[in-house]
């Protein structure tokens, strides 16, 4: 198994927390809707994989109640206070090899985690193994191949295309699939999950929107990694950041593919 670190591990805590909280602000409402639709209710046991800043795990805990467990797992739980008052259990572990009780959870959820793992199939198998027969697996992963600038200043559009190529190259060099979201439905089938449903959400957003601001934070945190690919220059990244702040510049920054499936009795 690769020992490479999560790409944002070197970002200063303050910057990374701000970025994770921006992700939560934008994506928690659709995630909560999906988790509710899977039947999440009082009494369920839940696992949140790659819990990040923890908002979804804390929200799940409010729903399942005091007597039920919500385990918030992260390979670097720097933003999950172990003595938190929310009642969630913090687990410092790697989903690729974590030892989890088999056939236990009613719901296992991960958002924007598997794409960081070359061994995403192993991680998915581990998530499925700890799920109860009849339990629900909800995975939301990005598809960066959907990224495209559609309106704005010509030289900035050119730079955005170059930075998008750098994002592809950075992930490819790490053996990661920048369009992993597209593979998840077929992987769910291969693993024998049933009642599979898929949503593909690719917002077309103007500069200075929440998505554009969050992508600017990613570009700032990962700038050196983008430059190292040779696909984009410092000036390109500066132009990308200006584009992301121009309310007359529009782009699809990426798509989120959300897949829900149920573990059968025979899995
Ligand atoms: C992009 S963040 C997403 C955070 C959160 N799921 C969200 O959407 O708000 C990815 C998170 O996954 C965690 N992570 C990365 N690799 C992991 C692994 N192998 N096992 C568990 N967590 C991992 C990172 O530390 C980080 O907190």
Image (spheres, rainbow, N blue to C red):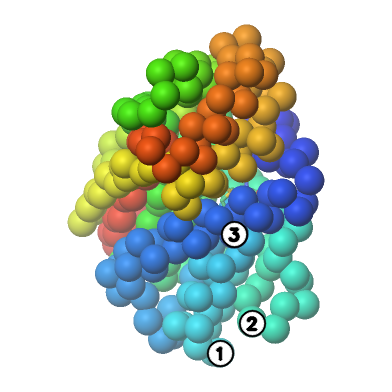
Q: Position of residue 139 (x, y in %)?
A: 40, 51
Q: Which of 156 and 33 is in front in this view?
A: 156
Q: Position of residue 95 (x, y in %)?
A: 59, 49
Q: Which of 109 and 34 is in front in this view?
A: 34
**Tag shown at residue 66:** 1
Determine the image quadrant of residue 185.
top left
Helix, strand or loop at disc 1?
loop
| Image quarter hosting the N terminus | top right
Marks 2 and 3, how far apart at CA: 20 Å
- Disc 1 packing (10 Å; few <14; some 14–19; many ≥20): some
Q: Which residue lies furthest to the bottom in this view?
A: 66
Helix, strand or loop at disc 3?
helix
Query: Counting residues from the N terminus, which is met first, the one under dot 1 or under dot 2?
Result: 1
Mark 2 or 3: in front is 3
**Considering only vertical position in the picture, is 259 above or below 62?**
above
**Are discs 1 and 2 less than 8 Å apart at CB?**
yes
- Disc 3 packing (10 Å; few <14; some 14–19; many ≥20): some
**Considering only vertical position in the picture, is 93 above or below 104?**
above
Query: Counting residues from the N terminus, which is met first, the one under dot 1 or under dot 3?
Result: 3
Mark 1 or 3: in front is 3
Residue drawn at (53%, 28%), measured in percent from left and top?
A: 240
Residue drawn at (75%, 41%), measured in percent from left and top?
A: 11
**Tag shown at residue 87:** 2
What residue is shown with label 3?
21
Residue drawn at (72%, 78%), measured in percent from left and top?
A: 84
Query: Counting residues from the N terminus, which is met first, the one under dot 2 or under dot 3?
Result: 3
Question: Is 11 left, or right, of 52 in this rendering?
Answer: right
């Amino acid at each position: 198994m690769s020992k490479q670190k999560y790409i944002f591990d070197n970002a200063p805590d303050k910057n990374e927390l701000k970025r994770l909280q921006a992700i939560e602000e934008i994506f928690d409402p659709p995630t909560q809707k999906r988790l509710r639709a899977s039947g999440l209710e009082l009494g369920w046991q839940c696992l949140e994989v790659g819990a990040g800043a923890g908002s979804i795990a804390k929200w799940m805990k409010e729903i399942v109640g005091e007597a039920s467990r919500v385990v918030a797992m992260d390979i670097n739980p720097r933003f999950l206070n172990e003595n938190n008052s929310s009642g969630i259990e913090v687990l410092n572990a790697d989903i690729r090899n974590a030892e989890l009780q088999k056939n236990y959870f009613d719901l296992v959820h991960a958002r924007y985690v598997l794409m960081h793992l070359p061994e995403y199939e192993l991680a998915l198998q581990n998530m499925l193994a700890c799920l109860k027969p009849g339990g629900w697996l909800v995975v939301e992963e990005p598809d960066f191949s959907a990224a495209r600038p559609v309106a704005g200043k010509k030289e900035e559009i050119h730079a955005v295309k170059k930075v998008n190529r750098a994002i592809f190259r950075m992930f490819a060099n790490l053996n990661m699939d920048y369009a992993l979201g597209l593979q998840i439905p077929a992987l769910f089938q291969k693993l024998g999950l049933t009642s599979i449903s898929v949503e593909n959400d690719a917002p077309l957003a103007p500069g200075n929107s929440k998505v554009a601001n969050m992508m600017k934070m990613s570009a700032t945190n990962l700038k050196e990694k983008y430059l190292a690919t040779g696909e984009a220059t410092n000036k390109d990244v500066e132009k990308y950041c200006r584009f992301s702040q121009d309310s007359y510049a529009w782009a699809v920054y990426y798509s989120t593919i959300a897949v829900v499936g149920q573990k059968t009795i025979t899995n």
